[in-house]
Image: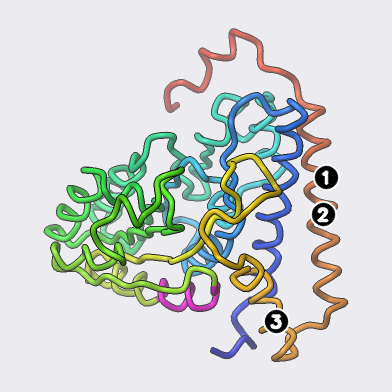
C-alpha cells in the first residue's frame, strides 16, 4: 500500500501517544497516584489506530476494560484522560469513571466497559439508532477473544445480521482472556470463522500492521454505510505484558515482541518509503513525551471531587 496520501504520520503519532500514555500511567499507578486499576495493553496500538482511522467523528465506538488506546485513537483529550485516571474533577468524566468507564459522547466514544462483552449490545443499539435515523453512520464494538465466548457476542451478531445493521464487530485477539489462553478457551483458531454461523463476512487481519488494519476496516465500513450489514473483523495482535500494570517482564502473547512491535513496523515502512526522516520521527516522539508529561501535570493540579458531586451528571440534560 502506498503511504503518500494516507495521513500515516498522524497514525504513527497516535500509536506512540498510546504507548507513552500507558507506560506513564503505569508508572503513576505504581506510585499510588492512580487509585483505580488500569489495564495495560502495550502491543495493541495498531488495531485501535487502524480501526479508528477509517471512521468519522460521529461514528460511534464502544470499548473494553482496556480502553486507553481506543480512547486516544478516537480523539479523546489525553489531559482529561489522565485526570480521569487520577480521579480528579477535571477528568473527562469528572473523576467518576476511571480507565474502565472512559466516555466522550461528542467524539462518538460511547464508553469503556468493565463487563466482558458489555460493549457489544451498546454498539449494536447505536447501529440500530443510526439505521433508524436514515443516515450512513456506523458503530464499532471492540472486544477481546474472551468476549467471543459470551452470549452477548452471539445474540448481537445474530440480531445485526437479521436487521443488516451498520456495525463492525472488532475482536482484538491477543491470545489471552485476562490470564486464560485462547488455546484453552476457544474451539476455533480464528474467531472470524464464527461469522459463518450468522451469514456475515468474517475477516482476520494482522493486528500489528496498522495499514492492513485500516485497509480492511475501510472495506467493512463501506459495506456498513451502504446497507450491506455487519462484519466480524478479527485483529490478531498481542498484549506485551502479562501483568496489567507492569512495564517490564515477558510478553503475554508474542514469542518475540520486538519483531511484532506495531510501532517499529510502521516506523520502518515510513523510513523505507521516504515519507519522513528519522529526525522527523524523533521530533514526533519528543512532542508526544512532552504532551503526556503535561497531561500528568494537569491531572495532579485537579481537585478531588467532593461527595456532593456524586449526584451531578447522573441524568442527561
Position of residue 25 relative to residue 55, above or below, is: above
Label 1 packing within 10 angstroms: few (<14), some (14-19), many (20+): some
Quadrant housing the N terminus: bottom right
Q: Which residues are magenta?
A: 209-218
Nearer the observer: mark 2 or 3; the answer is: 3
Residue at the disc numbered 1: 293
How many marks can you see?
3
Label 2 packing within 10 angstroms: few (<14), some (14-19), many (20+): some
The Cα atoms of the two marked residues, 3 and 1, are separated by: 27 Å
Residue 234 pos. (x, y %) = 37, 65
- Residue for point 80% across, 51% down: 291
- Residue for point 54% across, 55% down: 239
Residue 169 pos. (x, y %) = 33, 58
Residue at the disc numbered 2: 289
Label 3 packing within 10 angstroms: few (<14), some (14-19), many (20+): few
Dot 3: what SS? helix
Dot 1: what SS? helix
Residue at the disc numbered 3: 268
Instruction: Check if mark 1's residue and mark 2's residue have beta carbons within 8 Å.
Output: yes
> Is residue 129 toward the left or the right of residue 270 in the image?
left
- Residue for point 27% across, 70% down: 202
Q: Nearer the viewer, residue 136 or 87?
A: 87
Confirm whether the magenta stretch covers residue 307.
no
Amino acid at each position: 500500500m502506498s503511504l503518500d496520501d494516507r495521513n500515516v504520520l498522524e497514525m504513527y503519532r497516535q500509536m506512540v501517544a498510546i504507548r507513552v500514555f500507558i507506560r506513564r500511567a503505569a508508572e503513576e499507578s505504581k506510585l499510588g497516584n492512580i487509585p483505580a486499576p488500569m489495564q495495560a495493553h502495550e502491543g495493541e496500538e495498531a488495531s485501535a489506530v487502524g480501526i479508528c482511522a477509517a471512521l468519522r467523528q460521529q461514528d460511534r465506538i464502544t470499548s473494553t476494560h482496556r480502553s486507553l488506546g481506543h480512547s486516544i485513537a478516537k480523539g479523546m483529550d489525553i489531559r482529561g484522560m489522565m485526570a480521569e485516571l487520577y480521579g480528579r474533577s477535571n477528568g473527562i468524566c469528572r473523576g467518576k469513571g476511571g480507565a474502565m468507564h472512559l466516555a466522550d459522547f461528542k467524539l462518538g466514544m460511547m464508553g469503556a466497559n468493565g463487563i466482558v462483552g458489555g460493549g457489544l449490545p451498546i454498539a449494536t443499539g447505536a447501529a440500530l439508532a443510526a439505521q433508524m435515523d436514515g443516515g450512513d453512520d456506523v458503530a464499532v464494538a471492540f472486544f477481546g477473544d474472551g468476549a467471543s465466548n459470551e452470549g452477548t457476542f452471539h445474540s448481537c451478531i445474530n440480531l445485526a445480521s437479521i436487521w443488516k445493521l451498520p456495525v463492525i464487530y472488532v475482536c482484538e485477539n491477543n491470545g489471552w482472556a485476562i490470564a486464560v489462553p485462547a488455546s484453552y478457551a476457544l474451539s476455533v483458531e480464528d474467531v472470524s470463522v464464527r461469522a459463518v454461523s450468522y451469514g456475515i463476512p468474517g475477516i482476520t487481519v494482522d493486528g500489528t500492521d496498522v495499514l492492513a488494519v485500516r485497509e480492511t476496516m475501510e472495506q467493512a465500513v463501506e459495506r456498513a454505510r451502504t446497507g450491506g450489514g455487519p462484519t466480524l473483523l478479527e485483529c490478531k495482535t498481542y498484549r506485551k505484558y502479562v501483568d496489567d500494570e507492569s512495564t517490564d517482564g515477558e510478553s503475554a502473547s508474542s514469542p518475540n515482541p520486538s519483531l511484532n512491535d506495531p510501532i517499529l513496523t510502521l516506523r520502518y515502512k515510513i523510513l523505507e518509503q521516504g515519507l519522513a526522516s528519522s529526525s522527523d520521527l524523533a521530533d514526533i516522539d519528543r512532542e508526544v513525551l512532552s504532551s503526556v508529561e503535561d497531561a500528568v501535570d494537569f491531572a495532579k493540579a485537579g481537585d478531588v471531587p467532593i461527595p456532593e458531586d456524586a449526584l451531578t451528571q447522573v441524568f442527561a440534560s
